[in-house]
Amino acid sequence: MTPEKFTLAILASGRGSNLQAIIDGIEKNSLQAEIGLVISDVKNAFALERAHNHGIECLFLDPKTFPDRKSYEQALVKHIQSKSINLICLAGFMRILGKHFIETFSNQIINIHPSLLPAFPGLNVQKRALEHGARFTGCTVHYVNEEVDSGPIILQAMVPILDDDDESSLSERILEQEHIIYPEAIRLIAEGKLTLSGRRVLHCK
Ligand code: GRF
């Protein structure tokens, strides 16, 4: 780890395609940052393998070995604080983070969500957007606050819902956009291009 670089911690529970997009952005030099640590709450998460394959320090932190959510989050905080982390990126991390974690890293946690928030927060959102009959959906990168999927919005990309879409085809097209806007949002933060004004995230030129 080179101390002067903008350093990320990535928390992921699954396949880690967003993690991969961030790794690719760094390796292609379109994102001037480094990943200091990848943590997963799922032992066999493919995200851990991706990190390992790229020589990135990674850790499986087993929730079952902690008595409650608070102590699990305290351990997460301890591991993150042991590195000089500038930004925590949730990338398919399937746990809701509590007050202690969020207050410790105030305005330093971001998430990617596969809908155009504030529409369709929560789970199964591609299916819900289809069933609702929405004509457009997309993805959102936002700061994380104590309410699920409701922090200030950094970037969004819109994806049309086509007549022959099913959950899988729609999810795939949304994911393509996620892989573009997540590294881009990190780049904006790393370059100091964003300021918060209440709920609004202003983008400096
Ligand atoms: C993505 O759809 C992301 O928007 C959501 O969880 C999924 C994670 O996918 N929060 P991956 O593990 O990054 O491939």
Image: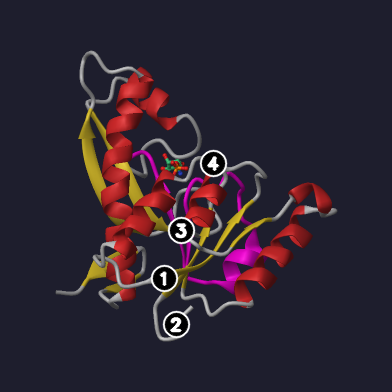
Q: Residue furthest top?
A: 164
Distance, label 2 to label 4, CA atoms, is 28 Å
| Residue behind mark 4 | 14
Distance, label 1 to label 4, CA atoms, is 21 Å
Regarding ligand 1, which quadrant of the image does it lie in? top left
In the rendered structure, which amino acid carries the disc numbered 1? Glu
| Residue behind mark 1 | 34
| Residue behind mark 3 | 54
Q: Residues within 10 Å of mark 3 (few under 14, many from 20)?
A: few
Q: Secondary structure at mark 4?
A: loop
Q: Write down the quadrant of residue 43 in the picture.
A: top right
The answer to whether the beta carbon of the residue marked 4 is less than 8 Å from any atom of ligand 1 is yes
Q: Bounds of the magenta span?
A: 88-115
Q: Relative to residue 12, is residue 203 drawn left or right? A: left
Whichever of labels 2 and 4 marks the residue nearer the N terminus, that label is 2
Whichever of labels 2 and 3 marks the residue nearer the N terminus, that label is 2
Q: Position of residue 124 (x, y in %)?
A: 47, 29
Q: Residues within 10 Å of mark 1 (few under 14, many from 20)?
A: many
Any magenta on residue 143? no
Whichever of labels 4 and 3 marks the residue nearer the N terminus, that label is 4
Q: Secondary structure at mark 2?
A: loop
